Structures are given as structure tokens and as C-alpha cells.
Image: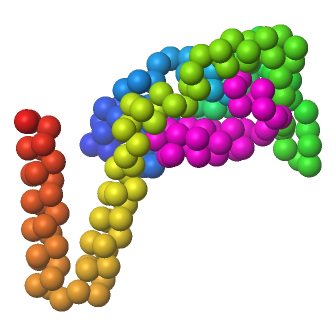
Amino acid sequence: MTRHEEGRGRRGGRGRGGGQRHGRGARRGDARLAILALLSEEPMHGYQVMTELSDRTNGAWRPSPGSVYPVLQQLTDEGLVVSNEDAGKKVFSLTSAGSDAAAEALSQPRVWDRFIEADGGVDLREAVGGLAAAAKQVGNTGTPEQATQAAAIITEARKRLYQLLAE
């Protein structure tokens, strides 16, 4: 097994920037409840479901196609959801049994709120992305001395983050 493959195994194979990001408050079945709740509002295609979930969790949960489409298929297999072609896209809507299941999902606090609460509303991925963009800019346009200083700042930040966890 290569070093890259080992790394994927430890992280659950999510890869760079993708995958389903669950906060500490997320539980199995939350994707199912969230999708039922969304479809109770209006029929949607898979990409709309992913976008809505990301938007409603302020980016704390960014579900991937690999986490949304299997749930949609399972809901279809269970007779809770039906799909129709519309402008070349598969649009999912609730059946009457799906409406009953959605009513149960809606009787609970909005499932996507658990992701926001668990994540504390902080988007560390965005913050790290901003740091990476700044580091790239220094690397591309800065002097060698500035690049050395930037590397030292990043190293110090990494150490401080680990100290934060150790406290």
C-alpha cells in the first residue's frame, strides 16, 4: 500500500475537499431525515439537495454525491421518493408515504441545525483555504526572505493549534 493510499484509509477515503463532513452532533440517519425534510418543501434534483444542505448548515456539512445519491436511491427503493426526468435531470419528490415520513422528520428540530451547533458555526476549512491562498501568493510574488518568514509563521500556527488541543 502506498503512503497516499494509507492516508486515504485513515481519513475514510474522503479525498481533498469532498465527502460528507459531519459535526460532533451528527448521527447516522441525519442525511435521510434532512433529505426528507427538504423534499417536503419542493421536488429537487440531487445537486439541489447537496447545495441546500450545505447552505442551511452554513457550510458545516458539505455532502458529496456519494452520500446523497445512495440515500435518494434507498428512499426510492422504500417507496418514499419517486424520481422523474425534467430537462434531462432526475428530480426527486415525495410519495404519500414519503410525506408521512417527512412529517416525522419535521417533528424534530431541523436536522441541519445539529450540524451548525456541532460545528460551532466556524468554518475552519474556509480559514485554512484563505491561509493557503496567502501562502501561495507569498511563494509566487514574495522574496525568498518573505517565503522563509511565511514558512515560519505557518509552522508556528501549526504548533499553536496542537497546543490548543493539548490544553
Q: Between residues 74 and 158, which one lies in front from this camera angle? A: 158
Type of secondary structure dominating the magenta stretch: helix
Residue at (35, 35) in percent of width and height: 11
List x then y, in percent, for residue 131: 30, 65
Q: Between residues 12 and 46, which one lies in front from this camera angle? A: 46
Instruction: Classify residue 111 by image quadrant.
Output: top right
List x then y, in percent, for residue 112: 55, 31
Q: Is residue 46 left or right of residue 32?
A: right
List x then y, in percent, for residue 144: 14, 85
**Can you see residue 54?**
yes
Label tally: 0
Q: Is the residue 96 above or below the residue 118 in the image?
A: above
Q: Is residue 70 left or right of residue 26?
A: right
Q: Is the residue 110 above or below the residue 147 in the image?
A: above
Residue at (53, 40) in percent of width and height: 57
Residue at (73, 15) in percent of width and height: 103
Magenta span covers which residues? 36-65
